[in-house]
Image (cartoon, rainbow, N blue to C red):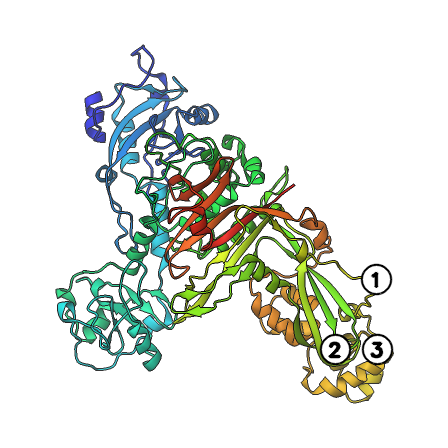
Amino acid sequence: MQANIDSHLHCLPRRAMKRRASDDACGHVASASLQPPTASQDVYKDECMWCFDSQDTPTGVAVCMHCFLAGCLAQAHAGRHCAQTGHALALWLRRTPKPAAPITRLAVVDVPDDERYDYERRIVCMACDTKHGRELRDVPAPIQAVASAIVHATSHAHKTEVHAWEEDIVPCAHTQALEQDAVAAPSLGGDASCARCELTSNLWMCLQCGHLGCGRAQFGGVAGHSHALAHYEQTGHPCSVKQGTITPEGSGDVYCYACNDARIDPALDVHLRALGVPVATLSKTEKSSTELQLEQNIQFDFRMVDDDGHAMRPAYGPGHTGIQNLGNSCYLASVIQAVWSIPAFRERYGHDAWACASPWDLECQLRKLTDGLCSGRYAEGEAPRGIRPAMLKACIGRGHPEFASMRQQDAEEFLQHLTTVLRRESHPEGDPTRVFGYVLEHRLQCTACRRVRYTEEAVDVGVGLPVPVRGTDGSYEDVSLFESLDALVAPDTIQYTCPSCARSVSATKQTRFATLPDVLVVQAQRFQLVNWVPQKMPVRFKVPLTESLDMSAYLGHGQQDDEEALPDEGHVAVDPDAMATLSSLGFSDAQAQQAWHATGGDLEASAHWLLEHGSSVDEGSTPLQTLEDMGFSRAQSRKALRLHSDLEAAVAWLFDNPDDPGDDDTDAPTATQRLGTRSPTTYQLMSFVTHRGPSVHSGHYVAHVRDDAGWVFYNDDKVVHAPMHGTASSVSALSDMAYLYFFRRMP
């Protein structure tokens, strides 16, 4: 019977597994009521639901044949699952991966598992042996059929990955309503070249007129002079297809310059034939944009040797676990390594994942992540496996149009999203994201009357510091962190309608820190728009590596005793008699109310204000209504008017901060009570995330983290000790070009 099972499941010669000495038939087999998984059911067979033990670990995993959840043997999660649910029978799996190409968007197919792995498989009873699983003999054919169905079912991880790729590119109005011009058939294949230069690869054919132009230069050595983009800017023809990606089936890599994104052309084969393209004779000769991006992010060539050509010393053990790249997930891996080096996160989620209500909960996956990174079980041996947090990525990205996809993403945006998601969770022991929170102090002073207004803005995580670009042709002047901080707190002169002066005047506006966070995250904003695409400029950003960072000079001090406050127009009670007086002058009720609030409730000043501004005031709405009519939420509009009494300034703030949720209707505590403290003011660099590549949408992210022994370099699942100097991947070399910096407050 065992030979039949091995033949049916395509087993390799198996290693002996500890089992009960008795060969008596298992009583749980007769009582088992099993059904093969349906097409709509998820089969979790790649790794344990509660830890990162997988089919690739020495003890493998046991897939429950009742509910198709995988549990490990080493941490007894399979046995616990059996004890909790009564599900006795399981399919034990252990595998050895065969070399295979990563999944790509243009080739989303279900590759049979037996073509991807060498397997050992057997049916076991976890109730008879909760530790190892008792191997079963004489298994009835219906149970064998369930085991076979599990083996051949598409795993939930693979199904999710396929879905993410499929949902990533969609049609647009320009591809769906494409109008074509009558032209001669363009030359394709080996005879093709750019119409404006000599390039014969990376060619994009306009789907409207057939023009061939080279694309943008791609990181990794793909040449291009953006002549296809220039054609769009000259003609307005939005859609092009990469000629080397056209297949006989009529598919290809389509880009819409109007949308500035990859798109699907549902009628690509029809459009190609209309241009006289012999689709059936073509073959795919070049990598698609997606394939190039995947190749960059999975195989990015960071130098992992020192100047003498010796491999950098691997880092093993607890806290030195790498994170496998899920396709385009280096942004996630790098941010996670930096964030989980913070004690507050390790302490918050350093609990047994089994205690969670459901393995699909974010709480469970965060505990699973913490165990995977900190236990050291996946950072042992000559070739440590690292962990593959696919379920965590799915939980964090659920419902998000970008982070649910397989696209490369911006690390800072992911940090913001991660912080938002974690803050929504229950934290009986304290919210770890509070370590990032602080409060900004905004000071406004009228240059005429010298009165001031102080407002506070709570910030959940990070401060963006522009990095000025000085220089050309690849030679740029270094910029220091202190220079950017000085620019952040420098006074700025604006035009302002002073409620005290009742007229338009100049005012100075200054931003400082009201409180400081326990962990200060700095984003080095060194991006510029080049051909409508964000491009990183190679400006070195100098931060203190060994010395401390003192933030005391950037603290605000609030209103001083010798300062007189500006009237708060947002909370001035309306005087009916004053409204009647202003209305008698020929102004509407809306105009009168705006004047009253703008001048702090002064009748004479209101009259003067109306004479100067009345014609520009919307007759039918208040400032709040005006902003809401522009499409902003009430919460956003309320915050904009709280920060800026001038309507124009409020509009400008809203456009500069489109993602700010605004102020809710509740009487929340002040920002100062919620986030940050004023001391200590000294910080030390604890980690940084570096991006290599010209755009946030390509290239590769890595992380450096300081520990007790020095610095550790995380390049996905490759983890090595990083020297301070002397290599291209050293701390001094990559810190100057980093994107995110994490500074911890010193006692």
Residue at mark 1 to residue at mark 3: CA–CA distance: 24 Å
Residue type for callout 2:
Gln
- Residue 561's disc is 1
Question: Which residue is nearer to you in this view: 180 or 189?
Answer: 189
Q: Determine the residue positioned at 74% across, 77% down.
A: 594
Mark 3 or 2 closer to N-term?
2
Query: Which residue is labeled 3 in the image?
Result: 602
Query: Which residue is labeled 2 in the image?
Result: 594
Residue at mark 1 to residue at mark 2: CA–CA distance: 30 Å
Q: Residues within 10 Å of mark 2 (few under 14, many from 20)?
A: many
Task: Give the residue furthest to the top.
Answer: 22
Vertical relation: 460 (above or below) 42: below
Mark 1 or 3 closer to N-term?
1
Q: Is residue 644 in view from this perspective?
A: no
Q: In front of the other: label 1 or label 3? A: 1
Q: Determine the residue positioned at 61% across, 66% down.
A: 633
SS at badge 2: helix
Residue type for callout 3:
Asp
SS at badge 1: loop
Q: Choose top left, top right, bottom left or bottom right for residue 23.
A: top left
SS at badge 3: loop
Q: In front of the other: label 3 or label 2? A: 3
